[in-house]
Amino acid sequence: MHTQTTVERDSALAVIPSIQPRMPWRVAAIEVLPEFCLHIRFVDGTKGKVDLAALVQSSSAGVFAALADPLAFAQAYVKLGVVTWPGEIDLAPDAMYSNIKKTGTWVVQPD
């Protein structure tokens, strides 16, 4: 007996172009670094480091407390120009860009 598998394709993907973020503060790529840090590259070529250690290890971390687990933190990815983690956790790319543009590093402090 021969079984044939059919794969359906989303025809909308062939018609609708993917979204390409163009604002300079949109994130193009990230690299997860040790100790709750990220290396960020923005669409305009600006690069820098984001240090989230103080935030994720704080008693006032809120939703970011979930990222205190290094395995959870390492799941960071870029979605539509924004650094994102599972569970709808993300970072404001405009604030990140502004701080990195000034000093090369954004150290995120808890409130």
Image (cartoon, rainbow, N blue to C red):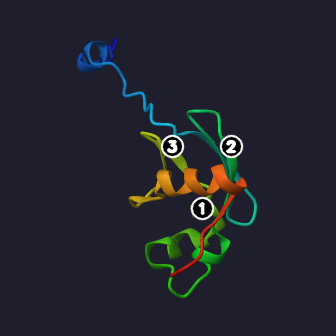
Q: Residue at x 49, y 51 (%)?
A: 93
Which secondary structure, mark 2? strand
Mark with earlier residue (2, 1): 2
**Label 3 sits on residue:** 25
Instruction: Give, as a three-letter code, the residue at label 2.
Output: Lys
Q: Is residue 84 visible?
A: no
Q: Could you give the CA–CA distance between mark 2 and mark 1, rounded to whole angstroms? A: 20 Å
In percent of width and height, residue 50 lies at 65, 58
Q: Quadrant of the N terminus?
A: top left
Q: Residues within 10 Å of mark 1 (few under 14, many from 20)?
A: many
Tell whether 72 sits left or right of 70. Answer: left
Vertically, is 76 above or below 24? below
Is residue 104 at all visible to an observer of this figure? yes
C-alpha span from label 3 to label 1: 22 Å
Instruction: Pinpoint residue 15: horizontal percent, then vertical percent.
Output: 26, 13
Find numbered disc 3 in the image and state the secondary structure of the residue it sits on. loop
Say which mark, if any, is on residue 73.
1
Name, please, the residue furthest toward the bottom. Answer: 59
Q: Residue furthest front?
A: 102
Q: Secondary structure at mark 1?
A: helix
Tag shown at residue 47: 2
- The image quadrant of residue 17 is top left
Mark before the other along the chain sequence, 3 or 2: 3
Camera-near label (2 vs 1) is 2
Q: Residue at x 24, y 16 (%)?
A: 11
